[in-house]
Image (spheres, rainbow, N blue to C red):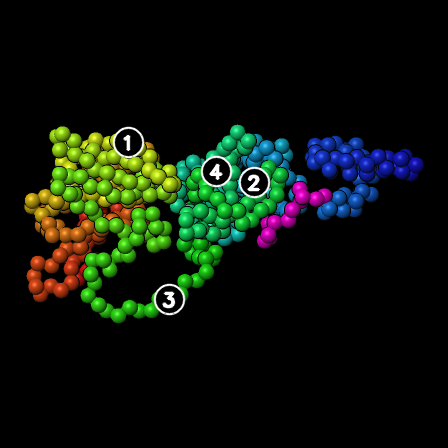
Amino acid sequence: MANTKVETQPLIIEIVWMTLVGSVRTLRAIWHRHVRVLATSVLLLGVIIIFAGPGFVRAEGDYPWTSALPTGTTGDYWMDENGNGKYDFAEQFDQWGYTYRNCTSWVAWRLNSLGATNMNYLGDAANWDNNAIKRGLVVDKKPLVGDAAVWDGSTKNPGGHLAFVEKVNADGSVVVSEYNKNLRGEFSNGRVARATHYIHFLTTAQRQLLEPPTPKPEEPTKAIPQPAELITTLTPTSKAPEATVPVVTPKPGGAVSFSADINGDHKVDLVSIRPNTDGKAEIYWKQSVGTKFSPKQLLVATDVLASDVHWAAGDVTGDGLDDVVALTKRDDGGVDIKVFRSAGTTLSAAEAWLSTTADQPFKQTEFLLGDVDGDGKKDLTAVVTPTNQSDVEPKVFWIQSLGDHFAPPALVTD
């Protein structure tokens, strides 16, 4: 008993000291060296953990590891399903493969609490978007409530960062909850930010658990629809509902200008179509820098005649960047539609997305560009002007974007 009493005092002193400096390895060493008397210090150790200060901030909700020792203070620790990765001790991991009180663990737990799956073993935060794409998940720059917000790595934190989107603001920024933002294993909530990418894990039903119910609109009175009433017309960068803009008819000579967010920075840029000496259209871009436009730069020189083409801009591929759409009405009544994909600072060469047949007369037609089905890709809507006086209602065709081509026109009115 005399030996036990002598060992207890230095044991307690060592536990207090090493808890303050946060060394898990040293605590383990103390366990093995003083196993006979460790039980006498359990109560003291619990008091130290509870009152240790800012390093032990309790998160909101029922996150179960708020009092775990923080790890990964130089970036998240992680492992894959085979046990490979960057970590110290396997028992510090949650069931999805991320260490307690790291950003990845918080987001995985938050998603799991809503019924989401497929967020296990995605690696460092900076790799979640690429690994999610490999699993077939949608990753883009358009945030939704319940998304995982991903930031690329930096010099300070090469592992990147992850947060949970609690709210989406009208300007496209998001309000997030997160762990380990300042690399101290702390929880924070309410930061307004813009992430590099957003991963859509939740189903519509799961996402509705986070959103307040929408009041059921009153049944509108039946009236003869006019083209402007068919789809709400907004500016090209409106977020809810998605913008619908008319296809622009070229002026004499083929010159025309319109707005578009070519690089996906949520600022409206200016796109200009100018004919070259051969009459072929050249597409120029003046980027918005917030308070002014930068000098124009050539995005692409096309092989289409500027005077024959009707133009529009919108995200027809669903990648968050506005593409340029060229629509040519043929003499037989059909139309040829080409798309110039945006790569951020350049446009691709023309891609033929659809040629309608002559038995679909679109000669006297107004075309609108907007996301009709809400899938994140802009579609074309063709409003055919009646030629018969007895026809009081125009025919409306929906030309759906499938991401790499347009579907054949579908009549959506009687």
| Disc nearer the start of the sequence (2/3) | 2
Q: Distance between the residues labelled 1 and 4?
A: 29 Å
Q: Which of marks 1 and 4 is nearer the N terminus?
A: 4
Using the image, tell me which numbered label, if any, was put on residue 297: 1
Three-letter amino acid code at disc 1? Gln
Q: Are marks 1 and 4 in contact (CB under 8 Å)?
A: no
Q: Is mark 1 on a helix, strand or loop?
A: strand
The residue that mark 2 highlights is 181
Q: In which quarter of the image is the N terminus?
A: top right
Give the residue displayed 70% in from the left and 34% down from the top: 23
Look at label 2 and name its amino acid.
Lys
Mark 1 to mark 2 CA distance (whole Å): 38 Å
Residue 53 among those drawn in magenta: yes
Amino acid beneath label 3: Lys
Residue located beneath label 4 in the image: 151
Question: What is the span of residues highlighted in magenta in the rendered image?
Answer: 52-63
Q: Nearer the viewer, mark 1 or mark 3?
A: 1
Report, in whole angstroms, how far the alpha carbon at label 3 lies from the one at label 4: 37 Å
Residue 271 visible to an observer of this rendering: yes
Q: In this view, does 342 lie to the left or right of 126?
A: left
Q: In this view, does 62 lie above or below 327?
A: below
Q: What residue is disc 3 on?
A: 216
Q: Residue 281 carries which label?
A: none
Which of disc 4 and disc 3 is earlier in sequence?
Answer: 4
Please name the residue shown 25% across and 34% down the image.
Answer: 284
Q: Nearer the viewer, mark 2 or mark 3?
A: 2
What is the spatial separation of the Cα atoms under label 2 and label 3, in whole angstroms?
A: 39 Å
